[in-house]
Image (cartoon, rainbow, N blue to C red):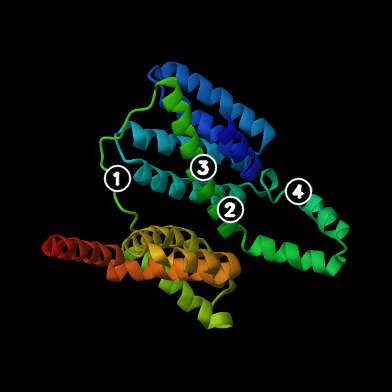
Amino acid sequence: MIAMGIILILLGVPFVGMAVMTAALLSQELRYGLTVALATLTVVFLISDITGALMAAIGSGFLSSALRRGRSMSASVMTASAATAIASIFGVILLPEMSILSQENLNSLMTLYSSAGLSTSEVIVMLEVLVYVLPAVMAVWAACGVMAAAAAAKLIAVKRGGWRKPSEKPQKISLGLLPAWILILALGLNLMGGRIPPVLQRAAVNVSIFMVLPYSAVGVSVCRKFLALYPQSLILVLVTGVIFPPLALGLLALTGVLDTWLDLRALMNRKMERNSGNEDTSD
């Protein structure tokens, strides 16, 4: 229940619903699970909006399906995150008046920003920026929500005895060459500025923003391996993260991109093996 409360406070109703629906769909009695999932989806739609309900349905469907097939938790979360991110963007684009872009929500934001002392022109500029990068914001929100919902669903399923241990062994987080070239292409288009169509420029900006998330996740994995090899560097990592958060995030994302070609974790594994071999020799 504590995990559910944290998800509700930080990420919102759609991901609480996603956690409940995923746990229900993982139950041994599938008919009962489907009934609970449909009831939960209805509640999410009534409390949230069509985009929230769409994200809850897509995320729980992909997540529970992958886990039932024996996929590892990390692989299942990556698949569900990608599907939910796409669903969140399409929900806003196809049905804007039934999503976060509804006139009611925009009016609420204008009132909120105006009460903070901003002028009308400043509020309009902020809303324009928000709408411009909204696809990336929605995608990042969806991906983070899926990760939190998956963790909560596992806790619920384990407690109810419905958790099946994945048959597939966990694999290290790695994105491959295609996402790296997509990011490089997006960054290249950003550098071209006004020389490309506005739609393409907006797409490039949003792709660049979103890709920071998965590559930062890879960077965190590399950082964990680095700290296992050099634990004395923990203070430096913490200081950088606390004092220079933007720099730390940029370094994590850059590390994730470089890992695509350099396979930094494999290099550190070989270093650890050499160190272990040297210790055995000295003994």
What's under tag 3, amino acid-wise?
Ala
- Mark 2, residue position: 138
Element carrying mark 1: loop
Mark 4: few, some, or many residues within 10 Å (few <14, many ≥20)? some
Mark 2: few, some, or many residues within 10 Å (few <14, many ≥20)? many
Element carrying mark 4: helix
Image vertical order of residue 69 relative to residue 278, above or below: above
Q: Which mark is residue 105?
A: 4
Q: Is residue 48 toward the left or the right of residue 253 in the image?
A: right
Q: Are marks 3 and 4 in contact (CB under 8 Å)?
A: no
Q: Are marks 2 and 3 in contact (CB under 8 Å)?
A: no
In 3D space, how far apart are the residues under numbered discs 4 and 1 (Cα atoms)?
41 Å
- Farthest residue toward the front? 283
In 3D space, how far apart are the residues under numbered discs 2 and 1 (Cα atoms)?
28 Å
Residue 278 location in percent, x, y? Answer: 16, 65
What's under tag 2, amino acid-wise?
Met
Of residues 241 and 1, the one nearer the viewer is 241
Residue 6 location in percent, x, y? Answer: 61, 39
Element carrying mark 2: helix
Residue 31 lies in what quarter of the image?
top left
Q: Earlier in the sequence, mark 3 or mark 4?
A: 4
Locate the N terminus and report the quarter of the image it occupies. top right
In 3D space, how far apart are the residues under numbered discs 3 and 4 (Cα atoms)?
25 Å
- Mark 1, residue position: 170
Residue at 50% over, 35% down = 152
Q: Are marks 4 and 1 in contact (CB under 8 Å)?
A: no
Of marks 4 and 1, the one in the foreground = 1
Q: Is residue 82 toward the left or the right of residue 40 in the image?
A: left
- Mark 3, residue position: 148
